[in-house]
Image (spheres, rainbow, N blue to C red):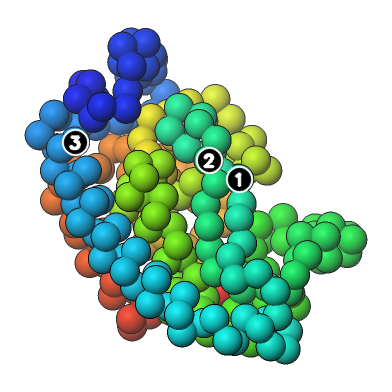
Amino acid sequence: MENSSGDITHSHIYYVQELLDLGLVEVRPLSRGELLVKRCIDILGSLIGCFLCLLFMLILFIPYKIGDNRGPMFYRQKRYGRFGKIFYIYKFRTMLVDAEKYLHKNKELFEKYQRNGNKLKKDPRVTGLGQFLRRFSIDELPQFFNVLLGDMSLIGPRPIIEIELEEYGERLLYLEIAKPGLSGYWTTHGRSKVCFPERANMELEYLKLRSTRYDISLIFLTLKQILIERDTY
């Protein structure tokens, strides 16, 4: 049982066991050794990622001062993590300032956004710089700090936003067993091409497959996706 990671209480241990006994979603428990190895991989990977993030902060300083890009370098968004804990992820801003207000003011665009799994293939809010950052997933680099702090892991279900909670129904509690990941099963098996409700099934599939070896395979698959396939938008 997951009782050695340092961030899970005894009440959480019994809570997870109750979910496992209920059996609505198949979950593979991680051993103490696997939890320790997973955290060590997270720390090592996040240190490398944080260095890359700091490097791009220097490179992008001037571009964020001119044209459509003018404005804050970072975008902050509330997400739901392990056991429903609320935390904030940071990304390099890829959209116009006040992009959320722009979306909600345009009813037709917002409905299209929801139908497409909270994404838009040709999003009018995305800047030219933002398109480049998204193409190579550079905009995700600040989340390595979330991994270093322990709010996220390198691999796991993606941290969800409030409007996505209902997509999981009674299975939401199972999703919250694992730390959300910078990448994961859904991210490497379709990502932008797979929307809810199929995405919910794929995110939960990770709980059944997770292991040290599987996490490492998804890390390499993520790198391949970023460098070769680039199926993001």
- Callout 1–callout 3 Cβ contact below 8 Å: no
Q: Residues within 10 Å of mark 2 (few under 14, many from 20)?
A: some
**Amino acid, disc 2:** Phe
Q: Is residue 122 above or below residue 208?
A: below
Q: Residue at x 23, y 21 (%)?
A: 3
Residues at discs 2 and 1 in contact (Cβ within 8 Å): yes
Residue at (52% x, 76% y) in the render:
134
Quadrant (top left, top right, bottom left, bottom right) of the N terminus: top left
Q: Is residue 112 above or below residue 170?
A: below
Q: Which quarter of the picture shows residue 55? A: bottom left
Q: Residue furthest left?
A: 33
The picture places residue 205, in percent across and down from the top left corner, at 36, 43
Look at mark 1 in the image and give the residue it sits on.
Answer: 78
Asked which secondary structure carries label 3, the reply is helix
Sequence-wise, which precedes: disc 2 or disc 1?
Answer: 1
Task: Identify the element where label 1 is drawn.
Answer: strand
- Regarding residue 131, the answer to whether it shows in the image is no
Residue 201 in percent (x, y) is at: 46, 43
Give the residue number, with chain letter if any, for mark 3.
35
Q: Is residue 63 above or below residue 106?
A: below
